[in-house]
Image (tube, rainbow, N blue to C red):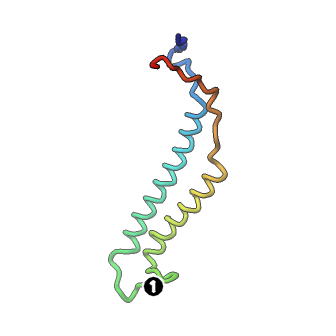
Amino acid sequence: MSQEVPRLPVGERQDDPVLVSSRREASIVLIVFLISLVWTVLASNYLGYDRKKEDLEYVFGFPDWIFWAIIVPWGSCIVFSFIFGAFFVRDEDLGQELEEQSDFL
């Protein structure tokens, strides 16, 4: 009925190209997320606390600490997401489609 696929020992297996591509893409997204997270936390802490109201400046209508700590990293992530998705994420061949098994019918 169904053929048994031979199993190789763990050290001799080759990772599927889809898995390799997914790991690479996930690693890049995780690194960008961590960079933006650290930037947001550190910039918010440094620019937002222990300031006098008179020292507050505005950038494009936002208080300066909000602009540099939130708007810039989030906007950068939006731009990165578009470029990454449009130019670097690619479809992988999934192989041949298996015939449907109708053993249960």
Return the x and y of residue 46 as percentages of the image width and height.
Answer: 39, 70
Return the x and y of residue 51 as percentages of the image width and height.
Answer: 35, 80
| Amino acid type of the residue tagged 1 in the rendering | Glu
* Residue at left offset 55%, top offset 11%: 3
Return the x and y of residue 41 as percentages of the image width and height.
Answer: 39, 63
Number of labels in the image equals 1
* Residue at left offset 43%, top offset 68%: 43
Q: Is residue 61 left or right of residue 95?
A: left
Q: Nearer the viewer, residue 5 or 80?
A: 5
| Residue located farthest toward the right when viewing the structure as drawn | 87
Q: Is residue 37 left or right of residue 29?
A: left
In the rendered view, would you say 27 is above or below 65?
above
| Residue located farthest toward the bottom when viewing the structure as drawn | 54
* Residue at left offset 45%, top offset 69%: 70
Q: Is residue 87 left or right of residue 56?
A: right
Circle 1 Cα neighbour tier, 10 Å, few/some/many (<14 / 14–19 / ≥20): few
Locate residue 53: give its quadrant. bottom left
Q: Nearer the viewer, residue 48 or 14?
A: 14
In the rendered view, would you say 1 is above or below 83?
above
Return the x and y of residue 69 as percentages of the image width and height.
Answer: 45, 69
- Judged from the image, the secondary structure of the residue bearing numbered disc 1 is loop
In the rendered view, would you say 75 is above or below 32?
below
| Residue located farthest toward the left when viewing the structure as drawn | 50
Q: Nearer the viewer, residue 3 or 18?
A: 3
Residue that badge 1 annotates: 57
* Residue at left offset 64%, top offset 48%: 88
